[in-house]
């Protein structure tokens, strides 16, 4: 193996820090269209950035198994996150339990709830003339919608939202919040097994694998992971989208005057700012992949947030083009671990853009604001104060 492929790139250059004072996507673009290379931190791992390379890697789950990250989080989730950290053929069996509740038809049925939640939240701060959209809107909206899909009883939703907020945004108390989340999930699953309803928790509680009921621990792990997947990405999607829109009045006007553009706009925002920017895998065998020798046990990070900026796949890739005719991005990954909640994420973001701009079409980032970013597992904007005329 050549020394060039083992050059000592440090993980900080790959945006693993949780708090950043710069845009992590701009930093990662330094590695755009690069062949696979080696990072020495955290015991060493391969980094894959080109679109075709990332797509091929993610589709080959037999060679590149899921679940092996390059950092050690405050909570050891590797043996808990189902189906994310399970590989074929078992992953398909777990996904089959959840998928019927993630179809476009089921998600479309949630649209009135989405619009009502958006309207209520916007009304709560509209007359103030300003808000931090991350804290007042982006973090609140998906939790309230997903509680409905999940099937949580109304008297437990606020408690559950509080634990979710803590888990997602308080690194020091994350482990405590995860235990509380799982305790509530276990309690609800036991209740749903006795009295099932037409909701996601009931589907998991009564799910079957190989004609046998899913065991309780697996059900808890699956439900808890699906819950987290429904909550941790959309606030970040909203943040990046509104950061762009606040600086581009023409794009805001287009939402108001040409509503059919919104789905295309959402796809472009998902491509430009792929918040689940890194997909960890582990080589299951020796292989020469895209010109470099990888060995069984080697860890690999597919930087899909960079891959979606690859000029070989996307014309003028760093420009937001809402009339892009072909947009085969991999913001939701690819292969057997492709995101289960892609329909939900798209629909929630479309509704958020539409409902916000019905009420507040003109706004800007508060002048002299210093933005801070999260470069950890999910690329996020931590603060985005907006203001508008009242």
Image: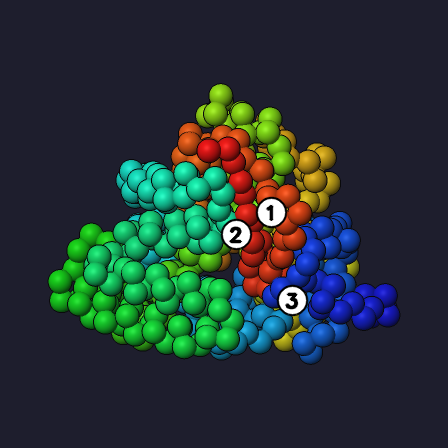
Front residue of 274 and 180: 180
Secondary structure under badge 3?
Answer: loop
Q: CA distance from mark 3 to mark 2?
A: 16 Å
Nearest to the observer: residue 5 or residue 189: 189
Q: Which mark is residue 182?
A: none
- Label 1 crowding class (10 Å Cα cut-off): few <14, some 14-19, many 20+? many
Provide the residue designation for mark 2: 236
SS type, badge 1: loop
**Point 30% across, 74% down: residue:** 183
Q: Quadrant of the N terminus?
A: bottom right
Furthest toward the right, the residue is 3
CB atoms of marks 3 and 2 within 8 Å: no
Residue occupied by mark 1: 273
Percent x, y for residue 145?
33, 49
Q: State the residue position of label 3.
A: 17
- Residue occupying image coordinates x 44% and y 50%: 136
Residue 20, horizontal then vertical, whole percent:
66, 61
**For the point 62% across and 57% down, which residue is it?**
373
Q: Earlier in the sequence, mark 2 or mark 1?
A: 2
Q: Residues within 10 Å of mark 2 (few under 14, many from 20)?
A: many
- Direction from residue 300 to residue 223 in the image, left or right: left
Mark 3 or 2, nearer chain start: 3
Q: Are marks 2 and 1 in contact (CB under 8 Å)?
A: yes
Q: Secondary structure at mark 2?
A: helix
Q: Residues within 10 Å of mark 3 (few under 14, many from 20)?
A: some
**Residue 291 located left or right of residue 54:** right
Q: Earlier in the sequence, mark 3 or mark 1?
A: 3
């Amino acid at each position: 193996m050549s020394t060039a492929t083992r050059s000592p790139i440090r993980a900080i250059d790959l945006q693993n820090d949780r708090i950043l004072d710069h845009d992590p996507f701009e930093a990662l673009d330094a590695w755009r269209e690069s062949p696979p290379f080696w990072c020495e931190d955290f015991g060493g791992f391969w980094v894959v950035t080109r679109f075709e390379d990332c797509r091929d890697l993610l589709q080959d789950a037999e060679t590149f198994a899921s679940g092996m990250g390059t950092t050690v989080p405050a909570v050891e989730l590797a043996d808990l996150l189902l189906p994310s950290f399970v590989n074929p053929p078992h992953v398909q069996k777990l996904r089959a339990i959840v998928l019927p509740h993630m179809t476009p038809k089921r998600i479309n049925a949630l649209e009135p709830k989405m619009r009502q939640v958006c309207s209520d939240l916007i009304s709560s701060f509209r007359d103030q003339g300003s808000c931090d959209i991350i804290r007042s809107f982006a973090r609140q909206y998906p939790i309230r919608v997903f509680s409905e899909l999940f099937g949580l009883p109304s008297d437990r939703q606020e408690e559950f939202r509080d634990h979710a907020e803590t888990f997602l945004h308080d690194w020091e108390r994350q482990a405590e919040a995860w235990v509380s989340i799982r305790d509530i999930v276990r309690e609800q699953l036991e209740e749903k097994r006795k009295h099932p309803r037409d909701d996601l928790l009931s589907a998991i509680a009564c799910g079957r694998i190989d004609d046998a009921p899913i065991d309780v621990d697996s059900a808890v792990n699956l439900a808890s992971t699906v819950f987290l997947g429904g909550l941790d990405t959309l606030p970040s999607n909203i943040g990046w989208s509104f950061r762009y829109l606040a600086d581009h009045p023409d794009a805001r006007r287009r939402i108001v005057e040409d509503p059919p553009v919104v789905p295309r706009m959402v796809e472009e925002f998902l491509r430009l700012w792929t918040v689940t920017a890194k997909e960890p895998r582990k080589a299951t065998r020796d292989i020469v992949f895209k010109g470099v020798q990888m060995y069984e046990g080697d860890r690999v990070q597919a930087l899909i947030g960079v891959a979606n900026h690859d000029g070989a796949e996307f014309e003028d890739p760093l420009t937001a083009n809402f009339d892009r005719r072909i947009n085969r991005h991999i913001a939701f990954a690819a292969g057997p671990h492709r995101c289960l909640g892609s329909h939900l994420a798209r629909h929630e973001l479309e509704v958020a853009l539409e409902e916000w701009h019905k009420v507040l079409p003109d706004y800007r980032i508060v002048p002299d604001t210093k933005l801070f970013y999260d470069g950890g597992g999910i690329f996020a904007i931590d603060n985005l104060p907006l203001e508008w005329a009242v």
